[in-house]
Image: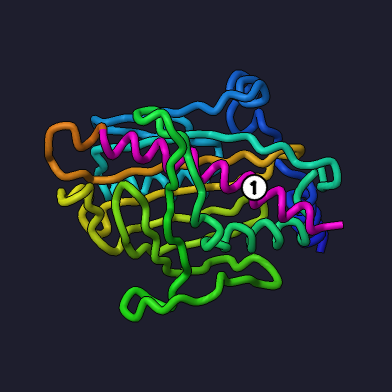
Amino acid sequence: MRLFFLLCLISLGSFLFAQSLESFVGSEQAAALRAGERPLVSQFRNPEARLLPRNEVLASYVEELRQDLNPSVMVETLHLYTKPPQANQTALSAEEKTALYNSILALSTLAGLEYFSASRGVMRTFYEISTVIDGPSTRTPIPDPAFAWPQAELRIFARQKDLTFGDNIYQYDFYSNEGAIIFIQQNLTSLNAGIIPAIGRNRLRSVVAVLDAGNYLLVYAASMARVVTLPGMNERVGASFSNRAETVLNWFSGQADEAFKGIR
């Protein structure tokens, strides 16, 4: 009975108290993130995770994907979202986590988002189309899913058209536990750069993890792919992944703002 009571206390404590930012990334990286830095690492030869926060579940997903894919390109970034004053500053409440989870499932809100193209010096639309579909074969658009509480595991499919790789079908796998929401994107169709095949089907993985860090949400994003062997293609795909990361992180900030705004 005493052991059971102790385990209950440990479980309750892990639910009520989030990890500190320093425990995820160390004091030096934490200070840089608080100062507004958004580190970005691009690798093109035998890439390994360099910005990965200290989270065993996330680390296992990323390493498994890297081993399976053997990518020729990997781009990682970190982003720090400061919780608004009305949010629970100790750890996300059940209501807050549900609202945040449903806001992340709202893939239709990615449509029309813009990013700054350094090469062109202008703002460009990233996703022209982004809609959840009933399956990769029928591809019938359906509403964004929403749940009364976060699902431990969930798979959905989406049709997304971007300016770099065209109109494609993706699989999204969502995972939720006490202190994290993680989703993994996989391409179910080949990605083409114009008329040139760039990434074969099932050769792309993008991982986004939202980790509860007390006053903050730490967001880790990584995209990795096995790219066709053509001169300059790795660098072109890497630049696109950097734009993808920028777009997704900005999108997340807006979605999180709306999620917290709806909680009184």
Identify the element where label 1 is drawn: helix
> In the rendered view, does 258 fall on the left or right side of 181?
right
| Principal secondary structure, stretch drawn in magenta | helix
| Number of numbered discs on residues | 1
The percent position of residue 87, horizontal first and vertical second, equals 81, 47
| Image quadrant containing the N terminus | bottom right
The percent position of residue 191, horizontal first and vertical second, equals 25, 54
Q: Is residue 210 above or below residue 171?
A: above
**Which colour assignment does the render follow?**
rainbow
| Residue at 76%, 37% in the rendered image | 215
Q: Is residue 107 above or below residue 205?
A: below
Is residue 218 shown in magenta?
no
| Residue at 67%, 55% in the rendered image | 178
Q: Residue furthest left?
A: 230
The percent position of residue 44, horizontal first and vertical second, equals 26, 31
| Residue at 70%, 72% in the rendered image | 148
Residues drawn in magenta: 236-264
| Residue at 30%, 33% in the rendered image | 47
Residue identified by numbered label 1: 254
> In the rendered view, does 153 fall on the left or right side of 83?
left
The percent position of residue 179, horizontal first and vertical second, equals 66, 50
**Residue kind at label 1, given as amino acid type:** Gly
- Label 1 Cα crowd, 10 Å radius (few <14 / some 14-19 / many 20+): few
